[in-house]
Amino acid sequence: MKTSKVRFLLLRRCVQLLIIVCFVLGNCSIATFKNIQNKEEKLILGGDISSLMGDSSSVIAKQNSGFSFIAQGNLSYAEWFGGAIKLADPLSALQIFLAGGGLALDVWLGVMLVVVLYGVFLGRAFCSFVCPINLITDFASFLRTKLKLNNSPYKLTLPRSTRFVILSLTLVLSALFGVAAFELISPIAMFHRGIVFGMGFGVFAIMAVFLFDLFILKHGFCGHICPLGALYSLIGRFSLLRVSHKVAHCTKCMQCVRICPEPEVLKGIGKEDGAFKTMTCLRCGRCIEACDDNALTFSLINFTHKERK
């Protein structure tokens, strides 16, 4: 297989894994244990230190490791490079605000930075390049294809607009009950925090997403249910980075449509030149990799030309 056919896949995986590694290392600390014989230092990767303590030992000091400068926190709120860059999840912050919680200025600034980054430039790229649950759903999609489950006569149909309904419901429930509704059950938060701080009962939520995507509905969670993906679709509605189409190069093989997790994005393939402006595009690059005609590329919107809606 040519590298050009998987270049965006490799980039997505490298970015996702690098972010996870940065959080794991950034949240680790060094604990000094004292027992009858001596003192001992151990590196703690998040989690509970009690499991590392013997019956006759006690912690006399705990400090951040040298890696803590990289990143601290999680995807809900993180400080990068010693706090020089602060990023906050817009959906998490919005739920807390509607629930009546107070948010520090740093959190609001982190939200604004995320909104500007994805709203102006990257669109819904968070879902394909950052979100850790994408690793699970992509694996489920891969197995679904290998096991030929896409051809099963038993299919659940669910409108893709359902995620926007769930987004609205999430915000309403947060305001009514005074809790961050989606954060309580979010497999995204559970998976990421589980990797960084230790996996608990969240493994069941992650398994539920995997089985749902594998056996019940193709791209079920990300494409039909996830309210965070819905919010990033709205945030990135007018972002500059787009997939651009050249009709003259297109042979209408439809390989791009078959591979795209959001096929409505490419419903106009072979009809008009220009950038696709559908807000649900993941900017994952799958369609570009699948196209053997070089008819699809990433580009910035050219406002001097009429763009296809």
Image: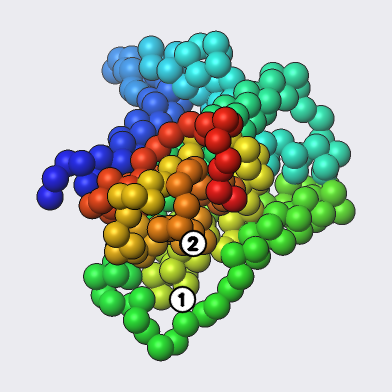
Image height check: is 215 above or below 281? Answer: below
Q: Residues within 10 Å of mark 1 (few under 14, many from 20)?
A: some
| Residue 15 seen in the current view | yes
- x and y percentages locating residue 194 in the rendered image: 46, 44
Q: Farthest residue in the bottom direction?
A: 153
Residue at 46%, 76% (x, y): give it. 216
204 or 109: nearer the viewer = 109
Graded by Cα atoms within 10 Å as few (under 14), some (14 to 19) or many (20 or more), the crowding at tag 2 reads few
Asked if residue 306 is positioned above or below residue 209 in the image, the reply reads above
Q: Which residue is mark 1?
A: 216
> Residue 4, labelled with which disc?
none
Residue 276 falls left or right of residue 112: left
Q: Classify residue 116 by image quadrant.
A: top right
Task: Classify residue 133 as left or right of residue 232.
Answer: left
- Three-letter code for the amino acid on which mark 2 is drawn: Lys
Question: Which residue in the structure is indicated by mark 2?
Answer: 267
Total numbered labels: 2
Residue with the most extreme left position = 1
Residue 188: x percent and y percent?
52, 48
Measured Cα–Cα span from mark 1 to mark 2? 24 Å
Q: Secondary structure at mark 2?
A: loop
Give me the residue at 36% from left, 76% from top.
150
Residue at 17% across, 41% down: 3
Report x, y in % for residue 197. Answer: 46, 37
**Label 1: element kind:** helix
Residue type indicated by callout 1: Ile
**Left-right relation of 55 to 262:** left
Q: Is 199 placed above or below 20 here?
A: below
